[in-house]
Amino acid sequence: MLTFDRFKITVPASSANLGPGFDSIGIALGRYLILTVEPAEQWVFVPKTADVEGIPTGKDNLVYQVAEDVAKQYEVTLPAAKVYVSSDIPLARGLGSSASAIVAGIELANQLAKLNLSQKDKLRISSLMEGHPDNVSPSIYGGVVIGYHHEDETYINHIPNLQAEVIMIIPRYELKTADARNALPKVIDYRTAVEAGAIGNMLVSALMNRDFEAVGTFMEKDLYHELYRTKLVPELAIARVEAKRLGAYGTVLSGAGPSVLCLAPIGKGKDIAKHLAIKLSHCEVDVVGIDTKGVYVDAQVVTN
């Protein structure tokens, strides 16, 4: 039986799409899912913070199910563990809570079974589980990740350090991904698809060149999904006008929503957030950095 010492796994939140980067562009955010793992006689998950207080505490926990699936793929048996779970990533808000759990589960199996998985291995496993790379890849790599997932391969381009602040607007209501998906049309016409692709290409170019004025322009021109989801998230239109007026680069839905993300110059986030907190008093408004580390493991003993 494998044995192990106590360790901690930290996984950042993520925001997907970034406007026209539908299912293909993601950004790592400075909120975190943290697992503190120690040997035990049987598997148990112990929630430590409000955002995870309702999680399953046994083998029906998503983190365990992912870890066990990885173990089966590599034909190993995981030792039992007691896992203390802390998170400030709200559930069902478009901030990658399920993706962070998937990445955490992969890393849990990696550590417990000493698999020595590379980042590329973790990317491929998580993309196959999630179906696309835009949430899981930033949680693995940090920064901004542009990706394409195919049944035969997963491709990414990584921008490790984008100098900007992020204002997160988090409504109190949940929006299930299935409901957000159902708001989308079954098809879009050819001309619209070509234009939407061109907008996405321009956003990628602007990100690669750190041209933030262009980033702000093209992140607000999406034709794939925001047009159809705006009616589900009225906060988007308000935040877009108010944030731009105070100097934000641009504003988008975070993932499928309902959270909204504003990208702003370093140093301006606090003032923009203060204003938005007044305009959208029913929401939580917070300023976070862009996480640059991605998932990492700390072997130090942590006090619970």
Image (spheres, rainbow, N blue to C red):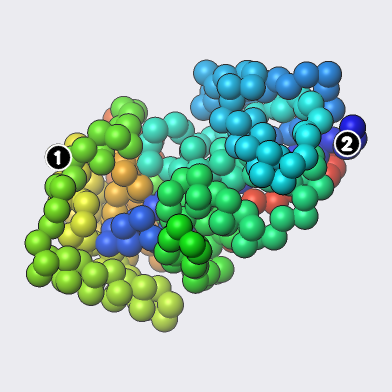
The quadrant of the picture occupied by the N terminus is top right
* Nearest to N terminus: mark 2 or mark 1: 2
Residues under numbered marks 2 and 1 in contact, where contact means CB atoms less than 8 Å apart: no
Q: Is residue 34 visible?
A: no
Q: Is residue 60 visible?
A: yes
Seen in the image, is 232 located left or right of residue 19? Answer: left
Say which residue appears at 63% left-offset and 18% top-offset. 57
Q: How far apart are marks 2 and 1 (CA)?
A: 52 Å
Q: Describe the element under mark 2 as helix, strand or loop.
A: loop
Nearer the observer, disc 2 or disc 1?
2
Say which residue appears at 9% left-offset and 62% top-offset. 189
Residue 81 vertical position relative to residue 287 in the rendered view, above or below? above
Residue 156 in picture, x, y percent from top left: 49, 67
Seen in the image, is 240 located left or right of residue 4? Answer: left
To which residue does mark 1 refer? 231
Residue 270 vertical position relative to residue 214 in the rendered view, above or below? above
Neighbours of disc 1 within 10 Å: few (<14), some (14-19), many (20+)? few
To which residue does mark 2 refer? 2
Q: In terms of image quadrants, where is residue 241?
A: bottom left
Residue 248 in picture, x, y percent from top left: 32, 61
Identity, as a three-letter code, of the amino acid under mark 2:
Leu
Identity, as a three-letter code, of the amino acid under mark 1:
Lys
Name the residue nearer the viewer: 70 or 281. Answer: 70
The quadrant of the picture occupied by the C terminus is top right
Residue 5 in picture, x, y percent from top left: 88, 37
